Structures are given as structure tokens and as C-alpha cells.
């Protein structure tokens, strides 16, 4: 359940993901050539351009600004932030062969019965969980993004009460000594877990490479920002028109991760 009315709802089919690459060519080779995601037309914006690949109903957007971050993202259990992709593919063996053909390491594939599982890292060191489902006919689809947080209850309140994402199941993760909470943002699942005592890899988009922001198209930016202000959340970018008919704003979650709100007017 979410805790908002129908004003300021997410209306996009899935979240888009903003990624800041250290090596744009390597990242596109990994996701497009290696995983088979479809290249889309680049978008030129003031101060940056976005190289894009289609990842199911959502899009991975690679920000090519003037600044290239020196710092790669750390691991899931080493700092707070947006840390992991879960991507579904029809066949992991074929995906492994594609990755090798594109110049990357092959996959160590584990048979889980109804599906197969493998982990790898993209060129910027972001952990990528790959699940292979026989008969899955949509190509490579971004299913989930994981967030390591410092206060899971504050994050749950933000995701449901400010952004209106629907909270789903929770389950223990013994290997990490924590509990995973899931939220539905259209077709995208957010996996959220708390690990105490970690520093945050948050702040401005260009501060680190890796997953830097998530984008939700909403029907009313002002309504979402009103809820954010009432909840005491920081708004680093107030609404602005980026192209005619499209405005955006940025709001921070309790750990300083950026969520981009987009409204078509």
C-alpha cells in the first residue's frame, strides 16, 4: 500500500535510471552489446548529453557531463547508496557468450531450478544480478534497483508517503544480517535494506560514478514536492523546464540519494 492520494502520482510504466559513467564507451558496450539492450537516440541537454539504452519498460540514461568522477561506487555492504541492478534475461548462457564476444568476462551460472542466476560487475564496478528465465521473451529487462540505507523506516516512509510507491513483501537476508523491503514503482522494484555504520555515497549527480538517480514521471510535480517539504526532505533542484513541455525537479531521500521527478506539461 502507498500513503498518497491520486494527486502527484507516478504515471510512467517504470523508473528510468540515471548512471554517471567513467568510461561511456565501455558502459554502452556492456549494456548494449553484452546484455543486448537496445540503443536509443541520445538526448542533448544543457551541460550534458544522455546516451540511452532501453531496459524493458524503463531506460538507462548515461550522463555525459563535463566532469568525469574519479571515484567508482563501492560495494553493497561498504557504503549507503544505490548499489545493485537486477536484470532478467531469457537465457544466461547466451548472455554469457554475448558478454565474452563484447570483451567482458563470462558468467558463472547457478541453476536455481525454475531459473538460473549469475552475478557480475559493469565497467564502473556496479554489482549486476542476472536472472535467466526460459521463455522470457522481452530481452534484457531491468527488474530492480537496490538501495543500502542508514534508516530503513525513514526510507520506507519517504518511498511510500512522499513518492507514493507501493510497499510489498519483506524478507530476512541472513548473508547480510539485515531485512530486505520491496517497493513497486511501476514495473520497477526497489529493494531496500539497512546496514548500520556506513557512510553515504550521495550528493550531486557527478560526485561518484554508478547509479546516481532514479526518474519517475508524475502527473503533478508540485504535489510531490509539497509532500517532500512537509516530510522535511531536501529539494536540491526546484522545478525547471529542460525542454519545451518538460520540467523536472530533484528530491533527496533520507540518505541523500536523488530522485528525479519529471512532468510533461
Image (cartoon, rainbow, N blue to C red):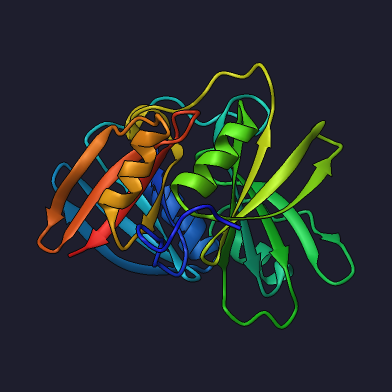
Tell me the quadrant of the picture where the C terminus can be found: bottom left
Q: Position of residue 122 (x, y in %)?
A: 55, 46
Counting the numbered discs, the total is 0
Q: Position of residue 97 (x, y in %)?
A: 66, 66
Write down the quadrant of residue 35 in the picture.
Answer: bottom right
Q: Nearer the viewer, residue 23 or 210?
A: 210
Q: Residue furthest right?
A: 113
| Image side of residue 229 versus residue 100, left or right | left
Which residue is found at the position 63% from the left and 34% from the top?
A: 153
Q: Position of residue 194 (x, y in %)?
A: 68, 31
Write down the quadrant of residue 162 in the picture.
Answer: top left
Q: Position of residue 185 (x, y in %)?
A: 52, 59
Residue 88 seen by the camera: yes
Residue 126 seen by the camera: no
Tell me the quadrant of the picture where the N terminus can be found: bottom right
Write down the quadrant of residue 199 in the picture.
Answer: top right
| Image side of residue 117 versus residue 87, left or right | right
Q: Nearer the viewer, residue 25 or 57?
A: 57
Q: Is residue 175 above or below residue 50?
A: above
Which residue is found at the position 71% from the left and 83% from the top?
A: 135
Which residue is found at the position 41% from the left and 61% from the top?
A: 10
Q: Nearer the viewer, residue 210 or 33?
A: 210
Amino acid at each position: 500500500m502507498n500513503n498518497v492520494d491520486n494527486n502527484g502520482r507516478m504515471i510512467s510504466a517504470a523508473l528510468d535510471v540515471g548512471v554517471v559513467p567513467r568510461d561511456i564507451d565501455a558502459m554502452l558496450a556492456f549494456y548494449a552489446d553484452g546484455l543486448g539492450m537496445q540503443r536509443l537516440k541520445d538526448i542533448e541537454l544543457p551541460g550534458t548529453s544522455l546516451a540511452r539504452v532501453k531496459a524493458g519498460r524503463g531506460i538507462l540514461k548515461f550522463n555525459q557531463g563535463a566532469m568525469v568522477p574519479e571515484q567508482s561506487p563501492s560495494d553493497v555492504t561498504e557504503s549507503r547508496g544505490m548499489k545493485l541492478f537486477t536484470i532478467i534475461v531469457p537465457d544466461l548462457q547466451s548472455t554469457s557468450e554475448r558478454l565474452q564476444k563484447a570483451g567482458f568476462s563470462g558468467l558463472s551460472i547457478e541453476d536455481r531450478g525454475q531459473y538460473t542466476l549469475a552475478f557480475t560487475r559493469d565497467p564502473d564496478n556496479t554489482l549486476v544480478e542476472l536472472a535467466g528465465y526460459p521463455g522470457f521473451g522481452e530481452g534484457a529487462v531491468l527488474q530492480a534497483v537496490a538501495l543500502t540505507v542508514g534508516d530503513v523506516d525513514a526510507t520506507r516512509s519517504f518511498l511510500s508517503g512522499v513518492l507514493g510507491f507501493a510497499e510489498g513483501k519483506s524478507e530476512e537476508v541472513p548473508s547480510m544480517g539485515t531485512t530486505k523491503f520491496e517497493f513497486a514503482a511501476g514495473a520497477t522494484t526497489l529493494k531496500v535494506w539497512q546496514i548500520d555504520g556506513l557512510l553515504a555515497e550521495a550528493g550531486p549527480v557527478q560526485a561518484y560514478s554508478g547509479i546516481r538517480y532514479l526518474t519517475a514521471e508524475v502527473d503533478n510535480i508540485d504535489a510531490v514536492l509539497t509532500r517532500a517539504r512537509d516530510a522535511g526532505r531536501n529539494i536540491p533542484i526546484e522545478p525547471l523546464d529542460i525542454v519545451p513541455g518538460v520540467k523536472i525537479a530533484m528530491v533527496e531521500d533520507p540518505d541523500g540519494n536523488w530522485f528525479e521527478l519529471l512532468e510533461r506539461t
